[in-house]
Image: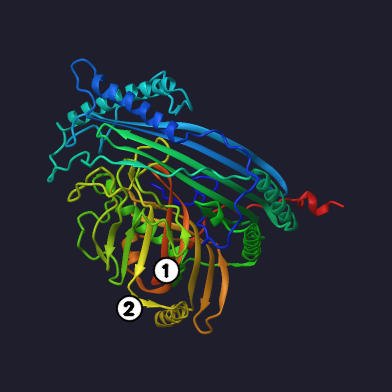
């Protein structure tokens, strides 16, 4: 089962969507010196080093009696980070780091048929030495040495995979439509602006200690943490087609997370996350402290909330929950590689120009959006991890499927990338979402109050005792593969039962959202005029990448909730030590 998550917090199976950024914080004035990172001239030296080794390899790298690579790409990421974390008034982490890691892509064969794109069984050799992906921070000869070993290793594997793939054609039927292995794209040249990391660890330490110390007052908490971090990645990309891209990605994060256990033993989690690409767009410390107070108050309310039975019926999904629904049920199924992989379920394969959503809904993904309604978006970039200029991808227009998220892996009917080839670190780039935007036509939009009236009317029409209001979801996962069921799951955090007669709302807990994609999205009947903007990270085959979702609240005539499966354990026997301190 292939899992997709938004905003990983503490591992692959825990996730939390962030709330919209509000407030501001002053730019640090007493920043500690950061590790040296390349300036403009040093960057050009790095580019020169990459090009020199790439040229040497393209000219001379080949085994006797075999062909060399027809395409070679080097990507170097210079990653600098500052992190301060703590709990209950004490620090648990105080770190500053910098490292470089390299990804080498070697293709053997031709654009029409090479070692990539659906090799059923890649070659495997138990080697007693593997080239290191972490490469030197300085000295061009040492860097070239690391690239030399990586290129040699990658080429040998590529050649073996190419021969394996070519031999496999003996057993396979020919494709009805021949699709190339790799797209031809125009070379690009880009130098992005310098984005120095502004960090004030002294202030971060003081605030983390102060804010987390206040959490000791809430003795029902099992654990509570806070982390403030800044990350800057300088990315260098050169390839044998002549592309050269040097740009930077910078992000600041404030996150808090807390756990408690209800009297029935159910473990409950809540979190708050704030992201910004510019530090002055982060919320103030006062706002962060207030948000953490709300987080703890919600946990206290959840401890006393009633456990709801499994449910099928009408529901309103808030913008965050709508974003998760479309991310899991639609977005991942429109990623290009999934359309040509026989192991995938290929939900939307062959359905271009056919209706797949209600006619009042449209969906597009645009990495060029740096902000929406004044909020900076995590998914913004100008060039993807294959050196292709980012483009807006119109996925669904008025309910009709128009296209897919594309990397440089072509699919039937789509020969070129739209700049969505993305990867974390040294993973192989694949088509991924960036800034996914769900839009309801203006004529179909209603206010939040009207949406709730429509919910009550639908609940009464179906003869249900209540409907549901799902305000947010901590994360989601989906199975896109052909075996098993085409399904997705979301973990709601704040769910309210809305009485059919009185309209009164009651907080409930203990269920998770499940469904099949085509059925779930086609039961949407209305959308609000207001939208929510959420930032996070998404995990898939090419690693975790920053993403954003913009979506309205929606009304669906049927949503399914199943009972949450988790152990119910006894709470700690003793209270926390500070509860009994004199």
> Which is more toward the observer, 34 or 214?
34
At x 46%, y 43%, the residue is 194
Outermost residue on the right side: it is 582
Q: Is residue 55 visible?
A: yes
- Circle 1 sits in a helix, a strand or a loop, which is it? strand
Measured along the vertical axis of the image, is residue 92 above or below residue 579?
above
Measured along the vertical axis of the image, is residue 11 above or below residue 368?
above
First along the sequence among labels 1 and 2: 2
At x 27%, y 50%, the residue is 418
- Total marks shown come to 2
Q: Is residue 561 visible?
A: no
Q: Quadrant of residue 549?
A: bottom left
Contact check, label 1 and label 2, Cβ < 8 Å: no
At x 67%, y 49%, the residue is 208
> Which is more toward the observer, 540 or 314?
540
- Horizontal and vertical percent position of residue 349: 23, 54
Outermost residue on the front side: it is 41
- Circle 2 sits in a helix, a strand or a loop, which is it? helix
Q: Identify the residue under disc 1.
A: 552
Packing grade of label 1 (10 A; few <14, some 14-19, many >=20) is many
Instruction: Say whether residue 31 is left or right of residue 436.
Output: right
- Give the Cα separation between the discs numbered 1 and 2: 14 Å
Disc ID at residue 434: none
> Which is more toward the observer, 366 or 264?
366
- Horizontal and vertical percent position of residue 169: 16, 33
> Which is more toward the observer, 186 or 514?
186
Instruction: Say whether residue 156 is left or right of residue 98.
Output: left
Packing grade of label 2 (10 A; few <14, some 14-19, many >=20) is few
- Horizontal and vertical percent position of residue 408: 26, 43
Measured along the vertical axis of the image, is residue 257 above or below residue 297?
above
Q: Identify the residue under disc 2.
A: 443
């Amino acid at each position: 089962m292939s899992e997709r998550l938004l905003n990983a917090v503490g591992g692959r199976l825990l996730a939390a969507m962030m709330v919209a950024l509000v407030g501001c914080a002053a730019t640090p004035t007493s920043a500690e010196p950061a590790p040296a990172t390349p300036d403009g001239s040093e960057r050009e030296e790095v580019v020169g080093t990459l090009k020199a080794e790439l040229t040497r390899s393209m000219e001379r790298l080949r085994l006797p009696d075999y062909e060399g690579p027809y395409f070679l790409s080097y990507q170097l990421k210079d990653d600098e980070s500052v992190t301060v974390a703590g709990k209950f008034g004490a620090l648990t982490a105080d770190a500053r780091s910098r490292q470089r890691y390299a990804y080498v892509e070697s293709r053997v064969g031709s654009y029409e048929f090479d070692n990539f794109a659906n090799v059923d069984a890649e070659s495997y050799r138990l080697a007693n030495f593997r080239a290191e992906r972490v490469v030197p921070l300085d000295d061009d000869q040492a860097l070239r040495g690391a690239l030399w070993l990586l290129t040699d290793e990658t080429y040998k594997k590529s050649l073996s995979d190419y021969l394996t793939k070519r031999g496999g054609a003996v057993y396979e039927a020919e494709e009805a439509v021949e699709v190339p292995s790799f797209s031809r794209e125009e070379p690009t040249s880009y130098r992005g602006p310098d984005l120095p990391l502004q960090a004030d660890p002294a202030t971060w330490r003081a605030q983390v200690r102060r804010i987390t110390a206040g959490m000791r007052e809430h003795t029902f908490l099992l654990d509570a943490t806070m982390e403030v971090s800044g990350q800057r990645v300088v990315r260098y990309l050169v390839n044998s087609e002549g592309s050269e891209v040097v740009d930077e990605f910078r992000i600041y994060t404030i996150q808090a997370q807390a756990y408690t256990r209800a009297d029935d033993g159910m473990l409950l989690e809540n979190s708050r996350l704030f992201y910004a690409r510019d530090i002055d767009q982060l919320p103030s410390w006062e706002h962060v402290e207030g948000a953490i107070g709300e987080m703890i108050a919600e946990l206290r309310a959840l401890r006393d909330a009633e456990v709801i039975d499994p449910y099928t019926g009408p529901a309103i999904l808030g913008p965050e929950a709508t974003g998760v629904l479309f991310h899991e049920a639609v977005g991942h199924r429109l990623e290009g590689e999934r359309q040509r992989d026989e192991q995938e379920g290929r939900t939307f394969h062959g359905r271009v120009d056919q209706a797949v959503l209600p006619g009042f809904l449209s969906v597009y993904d645009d990495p060029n959006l740096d902000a929406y309604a004044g909020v900076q978006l995590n998914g913004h970039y100008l060039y993807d991890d294959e050196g292709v200029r980012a483009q807006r991808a119109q996925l669904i227009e008025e309910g009709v499927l128009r296209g897919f998220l594309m990397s440089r892996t072509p699919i039937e009917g789509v020969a070129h990338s739209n700049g969505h080839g993305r990867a974390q670190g040294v993973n192989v780039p694949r088509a991924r979402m960036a800034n996914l935007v769900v839009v309801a036509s203006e004529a179909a939009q209603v206010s939040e109050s009207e949406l709730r009236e429509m919910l009550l009317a639908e609940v009464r029409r179906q003869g249900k005792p209540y409907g549901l209001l799902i305000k947010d979801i901590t994360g989601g996962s989906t199975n896109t593969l052909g075996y098993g069921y085409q399904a997705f799951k979301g973990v709601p955090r704040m769910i309210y039962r809305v009485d059919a007669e009185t309209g009164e709302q009651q907080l409930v807990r203990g269920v998770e959202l499940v469904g099949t994609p085509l059925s779930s999205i086609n039961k949407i009947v209305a959308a609000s005029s207001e939208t929510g903007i959420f930032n996070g990270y998404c995990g898939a085959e090419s690693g975790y990448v920053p993403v954003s979702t913009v979506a309205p609240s929606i009304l669906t005539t049927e949503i399914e909730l199943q009972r949450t499966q988790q152990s119910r354990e006894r709470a700690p026997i003793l209270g926390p030590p500070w509860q009994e301190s004199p």
